Amino acid sequence: MLVLSSYSTPLTNFTRPNCVSQNSVPFLTPFKSRNQLGIFKHFDHRSLAARRRAQAQRKMNDVALELVDAALSAGIKARYVLFDSWYTSPHMFAELLKRGRYGIGMLKKSKKVYFRYRGRQMDVKTLYDQLRRSKWPTKEHYLYSPIVMFDVAGQVMPVKLVFVTKKGTANDYLVLGTTQTGLHPQEIIQMYARRWQIEGYFKVAKQYLQFDQTQIQSYDGLCGHIAVVLMGYDILALAQRENLDDRTYGDLFYEYSRPLPDIKFINALNWLMKTLTGIGKKLDMNEEVLSVVFDEFIKALPNNLTRLLGKAR
């Protein structure tokens, strides 16, 4: 799983296996020189410094897709890409589908983005008002979950929306969307909640790794400072994984927490009869003696169990 953050630092998250967080843009800067502050040197376009500056001046969503491509080409296995409202757009969803990945993001409550629902063109606010007026029953963990159709360059793209109540405000709501329409709304909410791991990283980086406590003023120096902070965080996260947090050993922790399925009673009785028969044969017991034992055992059982035992035999 890849996570796009609106912050300006890339990070690798060790808290879950196969879950890598990738930043969107490393220090975006204005393209026009008159809007840039500081001294900008000229570098050979083949150098890393020049490529880094060129990338920082491109559009945010374009660079986000470049970083997704870089992560996938590096061998990161991910089916989903999570992102906040900075990146959520029909174009982003469509580009991720071209890469064989599903997007999960929070939609802005904007009137500039339209889709079609039941043949009518509307925006998020209009759809929410219509669902409320239609008195659709709300669920325990979410409000509504319709599937809408976006038109991207002439191609129709279905997107599943999930309306959830905004925490702390009963009359406000948030909207999540994904191109994986087969997911249950609660699964979409749980997967999007994993973005919170990024906030945990920034808290540690700022409080303990001096992420925002530097006097460096050069662009390359700031990139180097961020790289050092990231390496420090990776070391701490790896040490925690190996020494303290057993839950990060793949999905083994989750498998241990699952209850074992109960054996059906009729299967248990069948196993009991076979076991008793096997013990009798090992002890060279007479068949008549075994029959007497079974008859006395059946007589001691309630009637409903006797019927089940008859089926098992």
Image: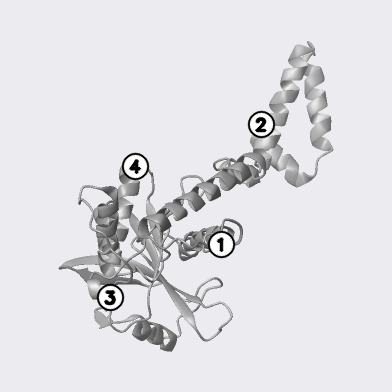
Q: Position of residue 226 (x, y in %)?
A: 45, 55
Q: Amino acid at mark 4?
A: Ala
Q: Residue at x 31, y 84 (%)?
A: 111
Find the distance from the CA under tag 2 to the CA under tag 1.
69 Å
Q: Please, what secondary structure does the residue beneath circle 2 have?
A: loop
Q: Position of residue 66 (x, y in %)?
A: 28, 55
Going from the N terminus, do you reach mark 3 or mark 4 first?
3
Going from the N terminus, do you reach mark 2 or mark 1 first?
1
Residue count near mark 2 (Cα–Cα under 10 Å), binned few <14, some 14–19, many ≥20: few
Q: Is residue 247 visible?
A: yes
Q: Please, what secondary structure does the residue beneath circle 1 have?
A: helix
Find the distance from the CA under tag 3 to the CA under tag 1.
28 Å
Location of mark 1 (residue) = 206
Left or right of 129? Residue 138 is right
Q: Quadrant of residue 7?
A: bottom left
Q: Quadrant of residue 86?
A: bottom left
Q: Position of residue 144 (x, y in %)?
A: 45, 75
Residue count near mark 3 (Cα–Cα under 10 Å), binned few <14, some 14–19, many ≥20: few
Going from the N terminus, do you reach mark 4 or mark 2 first?
4
Location of mark 3 (residue) = 35
User: What numbered label is drawn on residue 313?
Assistant: 2
Location of mark 4 (residue) = 74
Find the distance from the CA under tag 3 to the CA under tag 4.
35 Å
Residue count near mark 1 (Cα–Cα under 10 Å), binned few <14, some 14–19, many ≥20: few
Q: Nearer the viewer, residue 186 or 193?
A: 193
Q: Amino acid at mark 3?
A: Asn
Find the distance from the CA under tag 4 to the CA under tag 2.
59 Å
Q: Amino acid at mark 1?
A: Lys
Q: Please, what secondary structure does the residue beneath circle 3 have?
A: helix
Left or right of 44? Residue 188 is right
Label 2 or label 1, whichever lies nearer to me, is 1
Q: Amino acid at mark 2?
A: Arg
